[in-house]
Amino acid sequence: MSEAAETLIRARRRMSNEAIAKHDAAKLKGFFAADVKVIVGDGSLIQGADDLIAAFKGQFKDPDFVTYVRTPSAITMDASGERAAEEGRWAATWHGQTGLSGPYLAGWSKIDGRWMIDSELYVTVGA
């Protein structure tokens, strides 16, 4: 895998974590492909960047919601250099509540020269 591609993907993941921590839904949209598919921790499916951003906005309205943090452990590139898989652990926190956590897998595609998330799968296994 290209070290440069891995560095870019890890940087974009860090920036997306920062946008969530700041509750900045507008900035988050720039990380997702228009047709992104996300299976969230409870198994529900969110399709499309607009619906995903709407879900984030709903979370951001919760005064107890703090953030979601995704921490990559490995990034694997395909042979073409246009697609990558990111795997790691995620954790969610709320003020005064037990958080949620578990493993995740994200699919990244190079779209118009920029790494974008086109799919994600989150599994809740910890509370």
Image: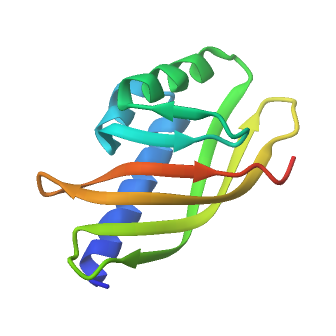
Residue at image position (58%, 62%) is 71
Residue 125 percent location from the top left of the image: 82, 54
Say left or right for 52 vs 89: left
Compare residues 124 and 21 and report the one nearer the observer.
Answer: 124
Residue at image position (43%, 68%) is 85
Residue 63 percent location from the top left of the image: 69, 17
Which image quadrant for residue 2?
Answer: bottom left
Residue at image position (87%, 30%) is 96
Residue 104 shows in this picture: yes
Say left or right for 109 vs 101: left
**Where is 31 relative to 85, above or below?**
above
**Where is 97 relative to 108, above or below?**
above
Residue 84 percent location from the top left of the image: 36, 69
**Total number of numbered discs in the rendering:** 0
Compare residues 85 and 98 and report the one nearer the observer.
Answer: 85
Which image quadrant for residue 72?
Answer: bottom right
Say left or right for 117 vs 124: left
Residue 16 percent location from the top left of the image: 43, 46
Residue 24 shows in this picture: no
Say left or right for 75 vs 3: right
